Structure formats: C-alpha cells, structure tokens
Amino acid sequence: MSVHELKRPLAVEWPAERLENLPKALEQLHHWAQITPLHTALRHKRQGQWYAWRWIDVLRDVERLADGLRQQGFNEQSRLALSGAFEPNLLLLALAAQTVGGQVLTLADDLEPEAVQQQLWRIRPSHSYVQGRQKRHWASANVVDFVQLLGPTDPAQHLARWWQPAGETALWSEEGTHWQGGLAVLLEQWLNTGHSLAFPENLASAQRDRREVAPTGLLLSAERLQHLADEIESRLAPHGTWRRRLCDWAIAHPQSGLRRLLKNRVRKLLGFQRLAYIWQPLKATSSPVWLAEFKRDIA
C-alpha cells in the first residue's frame, strides 16, 4: 500500500472515551506479524541509540504485557489510562489492554497537577501508565510498571546496529497524549499500512532524530505542524530585507532553480528529503504555507 493511501483517523472523544476500532487493530497486528514478521514495525531512540521492534516482536510483547496486566487484576471491566509521549511502550500497552478486553483512555500529558487530579477523579481508571516526573501526581491511579509487566527481557535485542534508513518506508511522530485523538491516528495509520513507525528520544532532540530517520510520512497534529512552520520562518531572512524578498520571489515561481534549491535545503534541514505523505484531518481548512508547498510537491 502506498503512503498516499493512508486513511482518515478514528473518531475519539477527549480525553476519557474508549478508543474505537482497537479490535480491528489487533487483527491487523496479527496480520503483519504473520506475513512480514521480520520487517521493522517500530523505531525509538533511547539514550542516543536507535532501537527497533520487528512485527513479530511487537506481537510477542503485546501478548506478554496482556498476561502481565491480567496478573495485576486487569480484566474486561478495567480501565487503563495512558499519559505521556507517544513511543513503543505506550502503544504496546494500549494494544495489550485491548487484548484483555478492557478500556483504553488517554489523558493529556501537559496538564497541571490539580487538573490531573480532577481528570483522574472523573475517569476513575483502574490502572494507569504515565512517564517521567508526572508519576508523583498519579499516586492514587494504580500506576503500572512497564518492565514488571513485560517480564525478563534483554533490551539489547532491539538495538539497531548499522541501520541505514534509505530503503525503509517510515512514518514519523513526535507527539504525546496532549494531541487530542492522536493515539487513534497513530494506531490506524501504522496498522493499516504495515509501515515502520519511528519516534524521537524526546521533543528537544526531535529535529536531529528526524534527520537521521528521514521519514516518508508525517503523523503530526496541526499545532506541531505550525511549530515546524514557525521554525522555518525563524530561519529565513527578516521581512523587508532583500534576502527575504528573494526567498519570497523564489517560492512564488515554481520553475525557478533557486526555489528548488531553497526547498531542498529546507527539506534536508528538517529531515524531509524522503517525505511523500503528510497526514491531516479531512476537515482541515488551512495549512501553514510551507506545508501547502510540500503537499504540492508530493502531489
């Protein structure tokens, strides 16, 4: 399937409704683990090194996590709340909870402590998974330990040595549960296509890590796309200068060699030299100027 054939996101209420179509997601996971078991499914940079999960690894980890959840009392009536950056652990837990039959909820990862407590009181999760320093605000939410759920494993088995991304179709996300409906978008686009899905080590290193992956598809919120547009704007010459007028002229003339030179420079700077697809909701009414330019090139 081509990256141009990626479909629309799932509809998810925010922040505490159950994710839709996860049973279908499990069917798709089994499908890819059966027909392309050794192809890369996930990539994530951790402590400066890239780690990779094959489709068969993803399926095995989901099954092990599901067993771990059951041992901690998770069942069909349970609710798992997820909060944090999107990365393999969070996705695997979402699929594991659905394997057991419980509900999967997301809570924005940028809430103030008081707001966290209010939301937890409202949604009343039986179990929760949260990253980093946020954990101290979730003491009453039965926070699960990913490593304990997964059981004994050797992290080095996922270490990606001598990896060259040139021949790999890779979707890219640098988001978290603050993106309303974002988890549903990632699961659907990733599992519908069977393409690899990659994540940066953290938001601060996202641009550097993105250049290393050189993704072929972007799964980003409107806010993050605008952030990238602002980043490009900050690197251009100030308005009113002759250099900025030259840039604006080049962009306005599609056949200009200078225009191609500028856009190629921007592509390489942002890690978009292989970019072939940018996800956007169907109801989106406008795009940042740079995004509209990229979409025209892709088309």
Image (cartoon, rainbow, N blue to C red):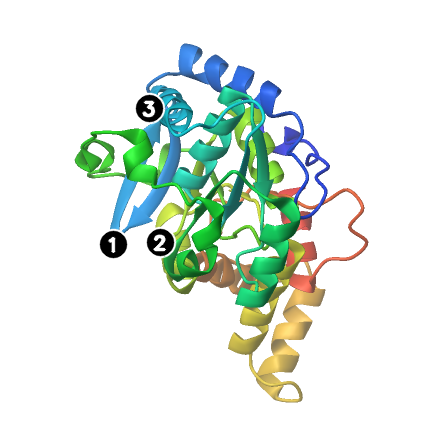
Name the residue located 39 percent from the left edge and 52 percent from the top edge.
Answer: 200
Name the residue located 73 percent from the left edge and 37 percent from the top edge.
Answer: 11
Which amino acid, mark 2? Answer: Glu
Image quadrant holding the C terminus, namely top right
- Return the disc, 3 or 1, that comes first in the chain's sequence: 1
Structural distance between the alpha carbons of marks 2 and 1: 7 Å
The answer, for residue 58, to whether it is visible in the render is yes
Callout 1: helix, strand or loop? loop
Image quadrant holding the N terminus, namely top right
Identify residue for label 2.
201
Q: Residue 201: x percent and y percent?
A: 35, 53
Q: Residue 113: x percent and y percent?
A: 53, 66
Label 3 packing within 10 angstroms: few (<14), some (14-19), many (20+): many
Identify residue for label 1.
48
Query: Viewer-proximal residue, 98 or 119?
Result: 119
Placement of 121 over or under 39, stated as above or below:
below
Whether the residues at callouts 2 and 1 have beta carbons within 8 Å, the answer is yes
Label 2 packing within 10 angstroms: few (<14), some (14-19), many (20+): many
Q: Which mark is residue 142?
A: none
Identify residue for label 3.
57
Q: Residue 231: x percent and y percent?
A: 54, 70
- Return the disc, 2 or 1, that comes first in the chain's sequence: 1
Q: Residue 280: x percent and y percent?
A: 69, 46
Residue 198 lies in what quarter of the image?
Answer: top left
Structural distance between the alpha carbons of marks 3 and 2: 20 Å
Which amino acid, mark 1? Answer: Gly
Which amino acid, mark 3? Answer: Asp
